[in-house]
Image (spheres, rainbow, N blue to C red):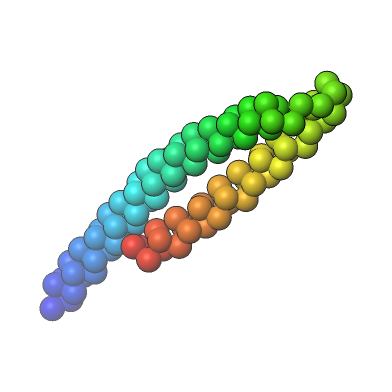
Amino acid sequence: MASRLSALRGSAMAAGEQLGERASRLMEEAQASNLLTFSLIAVSGFALGMLTGLLIAPSSGYETRHRISDRASEAMESARKMARKRAGEMAEEAEKIA
């Protein structure tokens, strides 16, 4: 009886380790995919917005550079916030799986 219980515990521990490893792999894959998609969308949106702004409302070189710098900083901060949010969501999903 004891050997059977020990074997059952061993099987359960092995299954738990396999599930944990699988959840980690899935989480890494999902984060990489989401981050790449988000990055492409963010860069495309930023570039399109920048071009539109320059074409519609031209101003002096100094003002334009200053505005570009401010908007680039805002876009980077927005991208960081969204990346942190997505990473948190993926971590929650991975915990549900594990």
Whether residue 28 is visible: no
Q: What residue do we see at 29% from left, 57% from top?
A: 19
Q: Residue furthest front?
A: 56
37 vs 54, left or right, is: left
Q: Is residue 94 above or below residue 72?
A: below
Which of 4 and 72 lies nearest the eye of the viewer? Answer: 72
Q: Is residue 31 left or right of residue 9?
A: right
In the picture, which quadrant includes the C terminus? Answer: bottom left
Q: State the quadrant of the N terminus.
A: bottom left
The residue located at (37%, 43%) in the rendering is: 29
Residue 46 lies in quadrant = top right
Residue that appears at 37% across and 66% down: 96
Image spot of residue 50 (x, y percent): 65, 31
Q: How many marks are shown on the rendered structure? A: 0
Toward the viewer: 12 or 94?
94
Q: Position of residue 80 (x, y in %)?
A: 62, 45
Q: Residue at x 66, y 40 (%)?
A: 75
Towards the viewer: 16 or 91: 91
Left or right side of 55 for 35: left
- Residue 20 percent across, percent down from the top left: 34, 56
Task: Using the rendered image of the protein, determine whether residue 7 is visible from the camera's viewpoint.
Answer: yes
Q: Is residue 96 above or below residue 62?
A: below
Q: Position of residue 87 (x, y in %)?
A: 51, 52
Classify residue 60 by image quadrant.
Answer: top right
- In the image, 57 versus 49, the foreground residue is 57
